[in-house]
Amino acid sequence: MDLRMDQDFRDFVAAQTRPLLGFAHALTANPHDAWDLTQETLARIGERWGRTRFDEPAAYARTVMVRLNIDRLRRLRRELPLLRGPSEEVAVELVGETDAWLVEALATLSPRQRTALALRYVEDLDVRTIAERMGCSEGTVKSQLSRGTERLRQHAREHGPLRVTTGEV
Amino acid sequence: MTEQQIKDGFDRIDGALAPPMDAAERVERRVRARRRRRRAAVGGGTALALAAVAGTVVALASGDDGSDMVAVDQPPGPASTLVMTRPDGSTYAFPEVTVSCQPPEGEDVTGGPQRIWATSPRHIEGQRVTEPFVYVAGIVDKIAGGRSFTFPNDWSTSSDKYPLVLFVADTDGNEAASSAGGESGTVRVLEASCDPVPVLRLAVDVTLGSEVGESSLDLAGRLR
């Protein structure tokens, strides 16, 4: 298959890159990692486009992305250069505001906690579907959501909108 | 802090980034790069397999006339009973596994700790894997000494390198690894050494998580 000739895949990339990038941003809390993860996800699907029948390619792409992120992709790719993509400069553009405290808080979470929260709050998925996407039990998802949410709230109390000032003069 | 406030924060993160204008071209380049690496890996794997089958290594010394060429018998190669089992119960055995302390061709590993690899031949036609292959890579100092590794593992070590990675690729495009999420099981490292010759003996009983959102794959057996 010559991807340059495959308009279906180009259409898929055109339609899905932005939403996948947003999801990846929530998964990674880092613009560079988000773009890298988005490209890697699309590249893996592109490799198989035309050879594999995807019933729901957009949902499939998110599952691939979740697995890659849980995998802590960059570390694995250092171990498996066969699968490593080329390094690139940050190519994405910041076009909206983010809550700095939330980005900071997400960076302190484990990849699995970030993944569970992103699936819950960005994708609006229920616990059962999150478990399917992450390849783990519902109990594990509940635990990750509970700990992750509590960590966010703790960070908000200490560094974010819920911070209490002492009123020193 | 309410659920809605957290949701609003995630909505802003979701919408904060715009991809580059040439996103499609960048993705295409990455797909092509992956394909090139796979083709390079096939050549390297085949060369390693041929060397293993030959059973000898020809060492060239520094003589100008070539008279110092000597043939050195290698110790017997590793015996592998590693078997991959798919969700439908079908299996694939990897009887031919090569152990080496030199990185497989196409793998750019320079510096860092001494590593050891166990790989089966890679057969790829075009972009398609025509026979499953297995890939094991370990950092010798971190896996030697009769250690066992239970998965999933957060590798809570001071190093950011995985001590041990297991990976299989199947003919349907599925790729599964020991750190892809959904992995479980145990690997016992019976022996790992590069001196005087590469030796890697393993007892494997793991489920490897799919990296491409497909089914997990079981890998079990011994390398001895």
Image (cartoon, coloured by chain):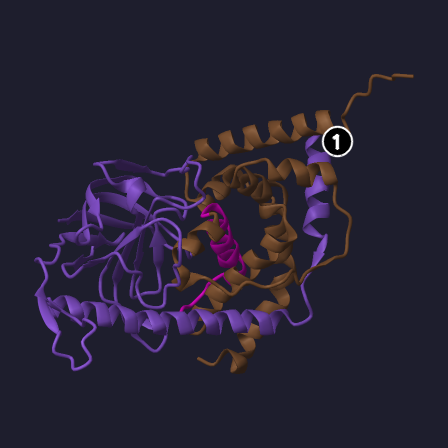
Chain colours: A brown, B purple
Asked whether the viewer can see residue B1, the reply is no
Q: Depth check: give the residue in front, B107 or B13.
A: B107
Who's the residue at 62% across and 55% down the image? A32
Query: Quadrant location of residue B5?
Result: top right
Q: Mark 1 points at which residue?
A: A160
Asked whether the viewer can see residue A10, the reply is yes
Question: Is residue A49 rendered to the left or right of residue A13?
Answer: left
Chain letter for mark 1 = A
Q: What stretch is highlighted in magenta?
A: A51-71
Instruction: Classify B33 as above or below B161.
Output: below
Q: Position of residue B99 (x, y in %)?
A: 20, 57
Image quadrant where one finds the N terminus of chain B: top right
Who's the residue at 44% across and 56% down the image? A77
Q: Where is residue A117 in the image (x, y as percent from the top left)?
A: 58, 39
The answer to if A58 sits in the magenta stretch is yes
Q: Depth check: give the residue in front, A105 or B11.
A: A105
Q: Depth check: give the residue in front, B163 or A144.
A: B163
Who's the residue at 13% across and 55% down the image? B78
Residue type at the position of mark 1: Gly
Within 10 Å of the Cα at label 1, are there few (<14), some (14-19), or many (20+) other Cα atoms? some
Specify the principal SS of the magenta part: helix
Instruction: Classify B105 as above or below A38.
Output: below
Instruction: Classify A23 as above or below B61.
Output: above
